[in-house]
Structure formats: C-alpha cells, structure tokens
Amino acid sequence: MFLGTHQPKLDDKGRLILPAKFRDQLANGLVITRGQERCLYVFPAAQFQQMYQELSQAPITSKQARDYIRVMLSGATDEVPDKQGRVIIPAALREYAGLDKELSVIGVGNRAEIWDAKAWQDYLDRQESEFAETAEEIIPGMF
C-alpha cells in the first residue's frame, strides 16, 4: 500500500528518485500516466495491467469509457527503476502535470501520485476544510 507524502526533486534529466518506501512495490516495473487534477498516477505494472483488463470490459459504444481510456493510455509509459531507484518522467507528462524541480509524491493506497510541490500544497489547502467537514453520508460507516 502506498502511504505518506514525500518531497523528492526532479533532476535535470527529468528523473525522479522514487521514495524508498515505494521502491519494493515498484521494483518489477511501473506505469506512469496522466492522473486527474493534473497530477501523474504511478501504478505497479501488474496492477496497471489488471486495471486495464477491467477498463477494457467497458462497452466500446460508451463514449465516456472511450474518452477515459484514450486519455489514460495515450499518456502512459512503462518504466523499470534503475539501481538507484530512479525513473524518467517523459517531457509530455512533466508538461501535463506542470512539474518543476520541487515535487510531492503522495501515497494514495493502490497508487502513488506525482504532483508539482506548489500545486499539491494549493490542492491540499483547498481540500482540508472540506475534509474536516466530510459527513457520514459521503463515506458511509466511516465516522
């Protein structure tokens, strides 16, 4: 499970050193793709394959499903971390997420997300008050 917030830096070659806590889960390969809210999603390769199998069950006649699959898969890249735990983030994905040198890599359970550090802080600032106000109806049985 991916948990926590980490603050790595992007190097001049567009490489990210994966947080140490995430490396074992991603050592056999990973997929980086466009995420929602202009972040990047990082999935273990096997989990991405499973997710794709589920997505591929959507009817081809569903425009919403076609659109979602196109956006997600057209931006996807598969990577294997090097011995230092580094992966390259392609320029198109860096541009999509507005990544600069300072990053926030967060664990979101089944995936990690890569955010520009300022964009993550802005998002978190906006969401914290809503988080505090979350009612039981939103997540039944949670509170």
Image (cartoon, helix red, strand yellow):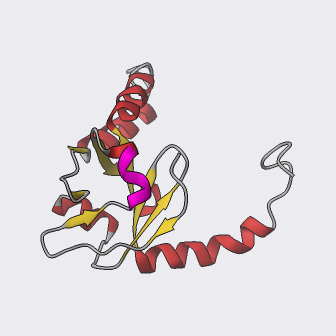
The answer to which image quadrant residue 98 occupies is: bottom left
Residue sitting farthest toward the left: 13
Question: Residue drawn 65% across and 70% down?
Answer: 127
* Left-right relation of 56 to 17: right
All told, the count of numbered labels is 0
Instruction: Give coordinates of residue 17: x percent, y percent.
Output: 28, 64
Residue at (33% x, 65% y) in the render: 97
Side (left or right) of 55 relative to 102: right
- Whether residue 137 appears in magenta in the rendering, the answer is no
**Looking at the image, residue 86 lies above or below residue 126:** above
Residue 40 position in % (x across, y down): 37, 57
Residue 127 seen: yes
Q: Assign the magenta stretch its main secondary structure.
A: helix
Q: Is residue 22 magenta?
A: yes
Range of the magenta residues? 20-24
Residue 54 horizontal/vertical position (percent):
45, 24
Q: Is residue 58 above or below residue 117?
A: above
Q: Residue placed at 17% from the left, 63% from the top?
A: 91
Residue 84 in percent (x, y) is at: 22, 59
The answer to whether residue 35 is seen in the rendering is no
48 w.r.t. 114: above or below: above
| Residue depicted at x 28% and y 77% | 100
